[in-house]
């Protein structure tokens, strides 16, 4: 799409009949602090972060040029609810949820993030897709499992996943509450031990850890039978010229990860 910088997922298991992309902060019209990090306009897609709503709509219109339909923007609340993307219609009240699924062509699932983990899903036959917003709370509480369950209820067989741009393991400092939450939600001693390995003690900061969201997501996905998992190579917090990061900047924009059936 002209001017808009996007990431094509490195996702070998993505079916040929499925389209997916993740946006960056570049290629839009938003000014600082929602800019592209290099003095140009930013592609902020979030209407809830303090940016001019008119400019956000212009950014969304730019993105829309390469999509088969209007993205199903939902109100994300760090929960586990899954929405049918086809039920999200322009002019209707905003649906609340942290994931969406689609099983008809042209319906676009969309998740906005600025450090939280976006996860895109597709059944191997290309008949059902989904997208989930996995901050640490939602990840620990089971939003990925709920998304997988909703996809299977819609007819999905084997499912693969792609882990989009999120805060990396060298940047995500958390407290013992986060560590304790994941261990408490683990299914059995072996999974608890695996989850503990996703946390490394922060040198010189007692009670603080560096958490690996990508590793935690792979553990959770394996729990629900999703073993074909790609991605997990970005760090929104350290790649300031490419991504928005709430942890880094506090006041900032939102990028999106989107998936649809062609």
Image: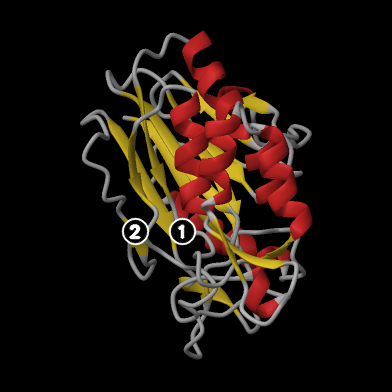
Give the percent coordinates (x, y) of residue 122.
37, 28
Dot 1 lies on which element? loop
In the picture, measured across the screen, residue 93 lies left or right of residue 189, that is: right
Residue 112 image offset from top left, x and y in percent: 59, 52
Which residue is depicted at the point 56% across and 71% down?
244
Q: Which residue is drawn at 36% across and 71% down?
A: 3
Comparing 32 with 242, the one in front is: 242
| Disc 1: CA contacts within 10 A as few (<14), some (14-19) or many (>=20) | many
Which residue position is annotated with label 2?
Answer: 7
Q: Nearer the viewer, residue 166 or 198?
A: 198
- The quadrant holding residue 176 is bottom right
Q: Say which mark, if any, is on residue 51.
A: none
Give the mark nearer the N terminus: 1 vs 2.
Answer: 2
Left or right, residue 185 beside residue 117: right
**Label 1: which residue?**
165
Residue 76 in sight in this render: no
Number of marks in the rendered image: 2
Q: Is residue 74 above or below residue 167?
A: above
Q: Left or right: where does residue 35 sit relative to residue 225?
A: right
The N terminus - image quarter? bottom left
Image marks 1 and 2: residues in contact by CB distance under 8 Å: yes
């Amino acid at each position: 799409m002209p001017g808009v910088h996007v990431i094509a997922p490195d996702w070998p298991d993505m079916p040929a009949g499925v389209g997916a992309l993740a946006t960056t902060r570049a290629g839009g019209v938003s000014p600082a602090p929602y800019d592209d990090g290099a003095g140009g306009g930013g592609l902020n897609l979030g209407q809830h972060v303090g940016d001019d709503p008119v400019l956000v709509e212009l950014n969304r219109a730019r993105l829309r040029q390469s999509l088969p339909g209007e993205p199903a923007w939902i109100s994300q609340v760090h929960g586990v609810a899954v929405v049918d993307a086809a039920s999200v219609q322009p002019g209707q009240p905003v649906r609340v949820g942290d994931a969406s699924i689609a099983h008809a062509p042209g319906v676009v699932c969309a998740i906005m993030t600025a450090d939280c983990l976006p996860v895109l899903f597709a059944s191997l036959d290309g008949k059902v897709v989904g997208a989930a917003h996995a901050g640490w709370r939602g990840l620990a509480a089971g939003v990925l499992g709920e998304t997988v369950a909703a996809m299977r209820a819609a007819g999905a067989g084997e499912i693969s996943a792609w882990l989009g741009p999120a805060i990396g393991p060298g940047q995500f400092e958390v407290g013992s509450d986060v560590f304790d939450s994941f261990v408490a939600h683990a299914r059995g001693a072996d999974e608890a031990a695996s989850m503990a390995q996703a946390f490394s003690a922060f040198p010189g900061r007692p009670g603080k850890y560096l958490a690996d969201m990508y590793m935690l997501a792979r553990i959770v996905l394996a729990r629900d039978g999703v073993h074909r998992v790609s991605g997990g190579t970005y760090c929104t917090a350290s790649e300031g010229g490419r991504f928005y990061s709430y942890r880094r900047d506090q006041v900032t924009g939102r990028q999106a990860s989107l998936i649809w059936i062609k």
